[in-house]
Amino acid sequence: DQDGMNNLPNNPQLRRFFKEFRGFGDQDGQGGGNRRFSHRDRNNDQPRPVAQGSGFFISDDGYLVTNNHVVSEGSAFTVVMHDGKELDAKLVGTDPRTDLAVLKVDGVGKFTYVDFADDSKVRVGDWVVAVGNPFGLGGTV
């Protein structure tokens, strides 16, 4: 394919990223400049920054943890559930030192959540799983 997208995984967010932002930043179209990627605001056609990240619920009433670097410059937050449903969220707090942030989703019902490990039972060498969202590949582990 002429646009070079045949080798990408079949992921709509990843494909959109490369289609929208290919060549930004310098004269020869090879990228590498300091341009901050953005989408157009639907209301006034002004550029607005967009970030993606992963997170997980820590309570059944809608509190979730994500990374501070994902939300630190944000003013509006949307949580996209595994079924594609989008929920508005409020920023509860951040900690830049540990790169953690807490968001809250209201009025939607109970959420399945993860429990943190009992730190008195965790030992060096125990298995852990890291979950992320690099390039919008939400199923990355």
Image (spheres, helix red, strand yellow):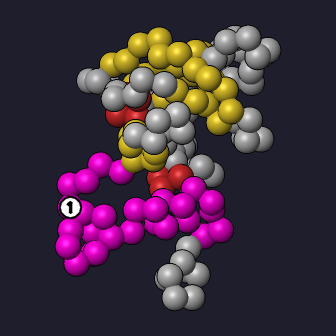
| Rendering coords of residue 45 (x, y %) | 45, 42
> In the image, 87: left or right of 70?
right
Viewer-nearest residue: 55 or 35: 35
Residue in view at x 62 percent, y 23 percent: 88
Q: What is the magenta range?
A: 9-37
Q: Which residue is mark 1?
A: 33
| Rendering coords of residue 67 (x, y %) | 42, 31
Residue 124 visible within the image: no
Type of the residue with mark 1: Gly
Whether 28 is drawn above or below 36: the answer is below
Whether 55 is drawn above or below 52: the answer is above
Q: Count numbered badges in the picture.
A: 1
> In the image, 117: left or right of 21?
right
| Rendering coords of residue 23 (x, y %) | 33, 70
Please say whether residue 15 is one of the residues in the magenta stretch: yes
Residue in view at x 47 percent, y 35 percent: 44
Viewer-nearest residue: 5 or 47: 47
User: Would you identify the image quadrant in which residue 86 lies?
Assistant: top right
SS label for mark 1? loop
User: Would you identify the image quadrant in which residue 32 lies?
Assistant: bottom left
Residue in view at x 58 percent, y 30 percent: 78
